[in-house]
Image (cartoon, rainbow, N blue to C red):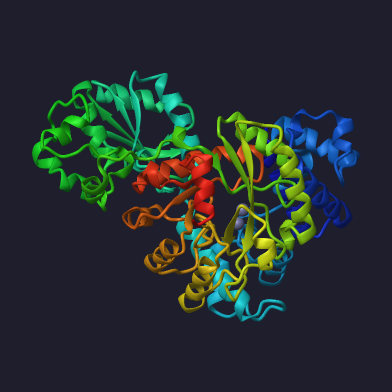
Amino acid sequence: MDNDQIVDALELLVKLWDLHGVNEFKSKNLAFAARGLDKFPGLISALPEAELLAIPGVGKVVVQIVKEVAASGTCPDLEQIIEQTPTGLLTLLKIKGLGPKKVRTIWQELQITEIDDLLAACEDGRLANLKGFGGAVVESVMLNIQFIKSNSSKLRINKAQDLADDIVQKLSHSFTKVAIAGELRRHCEVINSLVFLVETDDLFGASTLLQSVEYLDEDLKESSPFTWRGLATGHLIPIEIHFASAGEFVTKLFALSSTAEHLAHVNFYERFEGKVITEESEIYASQQMPFIEPEMREGLQEFEWQANHGDKALIQHNDLRGCLHNHSTYSDGKNTLLEMAEACRDLGLSYFGIADHSKYASYAGGLKEEDVIRQHEEIDQLNTKWTDFQILKGIESDILPDGSLDYDASVLASFDYVVASVHAGLTMDLEKAMPRVIKAIENPYTSILGHPTGRLLLARPGFPLLMSKILDACKANCVSIELNASPYRLDLDWRHIYEAMDKGIFVSINPDAHAIAGLMDMEWGVKVGRKGGLLRDLTLNALPLEAIKAFFSKS
Ligand SMILES: [Zn+2]
Ligand SMILES: [Zn+2]
């Protein structure tokens, strides 16, 4: 059981105690302990009791709860209170802007426990009549409900990959050949449905075999003799399992992995459907077309991209030379600067860029000027340790509402590079957002524009930007644009990478790691970067150390 799962269970228990208005003291204490545990860099489940007790807020009661959750994923207190809670309230607790106390008011005053009833109360004015629910609250609750409802069956790419890998493993017991197709094979950032292809010459037998696969529930109305449709227990994402004979496997996989627009471009249905093909490359070659990587088969600009850049290489994971946007215990990270740097070195990279939060982000332990000096002294000292590796002095500086950065020029000048990011005041229209972000790009100290739109996939849409103008400003000011590789963000959206490549703008694949494990998120950045046609030659952190220093110096 990993730390996040343990902390999530404790936080749920706190929320439910607050929702029911019970155990007020215990709840405050557990919330404090959960924050301490969340910051703990090691594996909590492996800690002996004495070390657990040394974590701030953790006493005997919390130790007991942590041990139970680590062993079974739950604990008697949690089970008992979930039992007493109408299921719909668990969904209401997920609505951004509604804490447990507000949900309790809604439950007690309006007897509402279901999300659809809450939406109706927003619309007919009942919610606005409650104390503490002004017009702005109601409006934001309505927006967030609509967002949750439209996204409830979708998964972010990393969660979809985990579930798909699990299903492939289970299907492999029954079928000799199993492939992932659909949106996941195309590395889409959000997955609407999981599509698989299995090889079989016995359609009836295949359907019978699937009935015995653990945790797959068939939807008999939607299934057909050629396709199984249904759900995996505990998940809402629709699943399709298609059947193919050995001879038609490659053509079916190609058809199931590409969009209709891509298939139309290669004239697929007229020329290839039903033909025996052993490699997907044959489909393109027979029409004198260049091969298109599976992740790019969207029917958007991949053919144009091939014509412009086809002889140059798409980025691959092992092209990366360093990692530039990371946090440490100086701000809100879980691991020390040295631990993060060593982990980065262990990955075979040659530089580690620290970019802790800046002073305006006080909620995230942003660095005051004296902390910056202290960190730079530590970096200078650490950099004497290695001959093959360096820590670069960066900062994730907040873009203030007026577009300026939150340090004086003298402090900004002390960094090797500056990632400029918006963290507060995200609710902006285009008229506010454009001058704010453009001014930050034009700041002579800005090196990288961090998570450009502030979106959180399936949780929060980004603020609006005219991306073409943002890219022009990046080009004019020698600023790289971040592809934030956290699977929660994947921002810059890959759809804009084509234009960035045409304009010759460097894209930086940044994990925004807040712990060692977060460094691995670069994998998702590479996947969606490739989808948008990201070239190795225009990936900022594929540059060797000296070249990246030259880029930062804007010389
Ligand atoms: Zn950030
Ligand atoms: Zn960050």
In the displayed structure image, the side of residue 237 where residue 552 appears, left or right: right
In the displayed structure image, the side of residue 258 where residue 92 appears, left or right: right
Q: Position of residue 270 (x, y in %)?
A: 9, 41
Considering depth in this image, is 459 or 532 the residue closer to the camera?
532
Considering depth in this image, is 515 or 175 the residue closer to the camera?
515
Q: Quadrant of residue 385?
A: top right
Indicate the quadrant containing the N terminus: top left, top right, bottom left or bottom right: top right
In the displayed structure image, the side of residue 215 where residue 249 appears, left or right: left
State how many labels appear.
Answer: 0
Above or below 196: residue 146? below
Q: Position of residue 260 (x, y in %)?
A: 22, 48
Residue 325 in view of the camera: yes
| Direction front: furthest residue | 555
Considering depth in this image, is 298 or 436 the residue closer to the camera?
436
Above or below 466: residue 188? above
Considering depth in this image, is 427 or 213 the residue closer to the camera?
427
Above or below 422: residue 71? above
Q: Quadrant of residue 225?
A: top left
Q: Position of residue 216 (x, y in %)?
A: 44, 33
Above or below 262: residue 71? above
Q: Position of residue 395 (x, y in %)?
A: 64, 55
Residue at the image position 31 percent from the left and 55 percent from the top: 502
Residue 13 in view of the camera: no
Residue at the image position 15 percent from the left and 43 percent from the top: 266
